[in-house]
């Protein structure tokens, strides 16, 4: 079979499961051939070896069962860095880059040093902050054993093991510790939204998605507890959904945070809330 035929095969097979069946097919075929996507497009008529076809078809099969491309490739790009991924952790989203960018700005502006990233998952936030600002001391926490494994690989591959990982249920392992800035992308979908995704065959772990009835279970705890773990004039940045921001803002005002503001992601949706605690 030729590249053109294999792309058609994939596009057809993935048309129901994926919103981007042709793109997915070309990414998977690129991986099998070790070509970049431009080379794929320029070589439509090239004949592909049987071995590569078998490999490609098994990947297309996996994708057709609902596995995201990132799980099949075992990697996902975030903020220009390649993160190792496996089934059982949330796949980094471009939506989260605004959180990293904002944290880096605040760290620089106020010469902050110690950073805590809660619910770190792959470690994409913590490790990117450390990469972009090596003067920081970054700690990352997560309750999930898969996160610990994936984080450890990324920390080694990308950051020379320079970020500290702590297995923890939110702040429980940080008694008496204080940080200059706490950042987090916790689970914040509602249980209904999570259930809907599971029914649709979504493969990411519900542990990383489900934030309870209104999606705010963990966020409420974080807003309430974070001041105990912040140095004076420490900062908190939380990622959530745009419909949750108003309520979060009220909760943060009630808890005494100052200088609150909300920033949008690349898609133009409110994505993070930022506050300072005196
Ligand atoms: N933004 C993610 C999504 O909509 C959810 C991530 C999360 O709950 N932290 O898929």
Image (tube, rainbow, N blue to C red):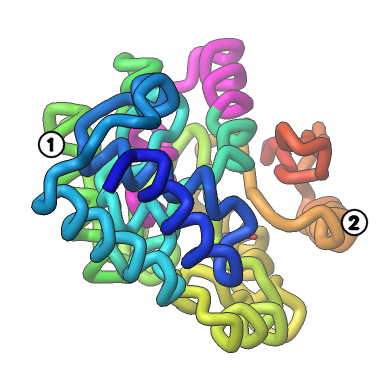
User: Magenta residues?
Assistant: 101-127
Farthest-out residue, left? 51
Instruction: Say which element carries label 1.
Output: helix
Q: CA distance from mark 2 to mark 1?
A: 39 Å
Above or below, comparing residue 247 to residue 157 in the picture: below
Q: Is residue 69 magenta?
A: no
Q: Can you give x and y, in whole percent of width and height, for residue 83 in the image?
A: 30, 40
Q: Residue 146's quadrant in the figure?
A: bottom left
Q: Is residue 20 visible?
A: yes
Mark number displayed over residue 246: 2
Q: Residue at point 38% right, 68% down?
A: 172
Mark number displayed over residue 156: 1
Q: Can you give x and y, in whole percent of width and height, for residue 252 in the image?
A: 78, 54
Q: Residue at point 31% right, 28% down?
A: 137
**Mark closest to the chain's N terminus, 2 or 1:** 1
Q: Residue at point 53% right, 12% down?
A: 108
Q: Residues within 10 Å of mark 2 (few under 14, many from 20)?
A: few
Q: Residue 223's quadrant in the figure?
A: bottom right
Q: Is residue 191 left or right of residue 162?
A: right
Q: Which quarter of the image is occupied by the C terminus?
A: top right
Badge 1 residue CB within 8 Å of ligand 1: no
Instruction: Say which element carries label 2.
Output: helix
Q: Can you give x and y, in whole percent of width and height, for residue 213 in the image?
A: 72, 85
Q: Can you give x and y, in whole percent of width and height, for residue 197 in the image?
A: 61, 78
Mark number displayed over residue 67: none
Q: Nearer the viewer, residue 3 or 23?
A: 3
Total numbered badges shown on the rendered structure: 2
| For discs 2 and 1, the disc positioned in front in the rendered view | 1
């Amino acid at each position: 079979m030729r590249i053109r035929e294999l792309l058609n095969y994939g596009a057809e097979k993935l048309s129901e499961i994926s919103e981007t069946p042709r793109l997915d097919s070309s990414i998977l075929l690129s991986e099998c051939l070790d070509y970049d996507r431009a080379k794929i497009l320029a070589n439509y008529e090239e004949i592909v070896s049987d071995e590569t076809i078998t490999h490609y078809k098994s990947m297309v099969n996996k994708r057709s069962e609902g596995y995201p491309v990132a799980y099949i490739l075992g990697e996902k790009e975030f903020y220009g860095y390649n993160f190792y991924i496996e089934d059982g952790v949330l796949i980094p989203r471009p939506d989260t880059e605004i959180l990293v960018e904002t944290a880096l700005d605040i760290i620089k502006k106020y010469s902050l040093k110690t950073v805590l990233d809660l619910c770190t998952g792959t470690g994409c936030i913590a490790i990117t902050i450390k990469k972009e600002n090596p003067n920081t001391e970054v700690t990352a926490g997560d309750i999930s054993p898969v996160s610990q494994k994936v984080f450890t690989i990324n920390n080694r591959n990308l950051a020379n093991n320079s970020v500290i990982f702590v297995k923890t249920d939110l702040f429980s392992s940080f008694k008496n510790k204080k940080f200059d800035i706490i950042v987090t992308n916790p689970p914040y979908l509602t249980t209904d939204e999570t259930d809907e995704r599971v029914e649709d065959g979504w493969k990411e772990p519900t542990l990383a998605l489900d934030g309870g009835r209104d999606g705010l279970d963990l966020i409420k705890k974080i807003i309430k507890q974070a001041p105990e773990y912040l140095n004076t004039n420490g900062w908190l940045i939380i990622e959530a959904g745009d419909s949750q921001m108003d309520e979060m803002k009220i909760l943060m005002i009630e808890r005494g945070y100052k200088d609150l503001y909300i920033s949008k992601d690349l898609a133009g949706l409110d994505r993070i809330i930022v506050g300072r605690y005196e």
